[in-house]
Amino acid sequence: MTQKIIYVGTAGWAVPAKERDRFDAADSALARYASRFNAVEINTSFYRPHRLATYQRWAESVPPAFRFAVKMPKSITHDTRLCDADDGLPAFIDQISGLGAKLGTILVQLPPSLEFAPQVATKFFASLRRLYGGQVALEPRHASWFDDAAEQLLTEYEVARVAADPVRVPAAALTGGWTGLRYYRLHGSPRTYFSAYSEEYLDRLGASLRAVKGETWCIFDNTGGGAAIGNALHLSERVAS
């Protein structure tokens, strides 16, 4: 029987001052954050590399059941647009190995202009899978990634397609690809990165997540005005068993 587990967290572990009394005192911001959440998404890896020792230190700061999602560098996803990935993937995979068993998922977010090209995508995911056998979530933002050919390829390489809000195409609101993982990224709507989600929305979301079997992630990326932490706390209370 497939174990059901729901990871809820935010993009980064900064806790606004107005929310800090809801967390335990701790030696670091990450440890304080981990007193209430069981997961976090590392977005800084998208902009710059981190040393192996840094990932090891982060892993040592959190409880055993805590998991990290790590965003793939933009040098791979945006600058070279998945081409020549063999130049950057080995270093990235080596760095994040410092998380050990606490590495939960690699997040691959694509630029909105990047169309699905079967040969490029196949070569990229084959290269990634030669180096890494763990979970992968893909957030495509071009409509071409939501057709049957892309769905088949993601399933073949065991890559989950992210369900995002707000969406650029209707299908982006639903998870897809490999069904062994479901990953939701909530960026804030209507104002991306800033708008908070209503309690009614979060209650409905919580009910739907509880109905899903297997492993599910829900990450709040509406961090611009500090809404993410409050929204994530509300949802984590709704999905708690």
Image (cartoon, grey):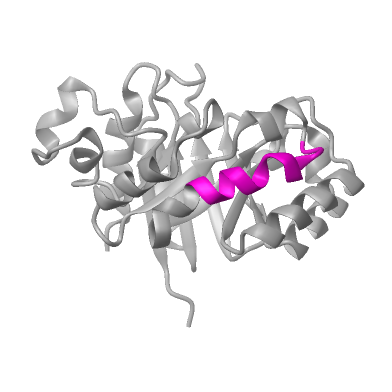
What residue sits 24% from the left and 28% below the top?
A: 15
Measured along the vertical axis of the image, is residue 1 above or below residue 239? below
- The reply to whether residue 135 is in sight is yes
What residue sits 51% from the left and 20% below the top?
A: 192
- The reply to whether residue 111 is in sight is no
Q: Relative to 236, is 218 on the left or the right? A: right
Measured along the vertical axis of the image, is residue 30 above or below residue 153? above
Q: Does residue 40 belong to the magenta stretch?
A: no
Q: Relative to 36, is 229 on the left or the right? A: right
Q: Relative to 79, is 73 on the left or the right? A: left
What residue sits 37% from the left and 33% below the top?
A: 12
**Magenta residues?**
82-95
Provide residue 106's location: percent of width, then percent of height. Answer: 55, 49
What residue sits 47% from the left and 21% below the top?
A: 193
Q: Quadrant of the C terminus?
A: bottom left
Among the 4 quarters of the image, the one containing residue 19: top left
Q: Is 203 or 239 nearer to us in this picture?
A: 239
Measured along the vertical axis of the image, is residue 119 above or below residue 1? above
Provide residue 9's location: percent of width, then percent of height. Answer: 36, 42
- How many numbered marks, from 0 up? 0
Q: Relative to 56, is 71 on the left or the right? A: right
Provide residue 75's location: percent of width, then percent of height. Answer: 67, 29
Q: Is 35 or 211 nearer to us in this picture?
A: 35
Task: Please identify the dominant SS of the magenta region.
Answer: helix
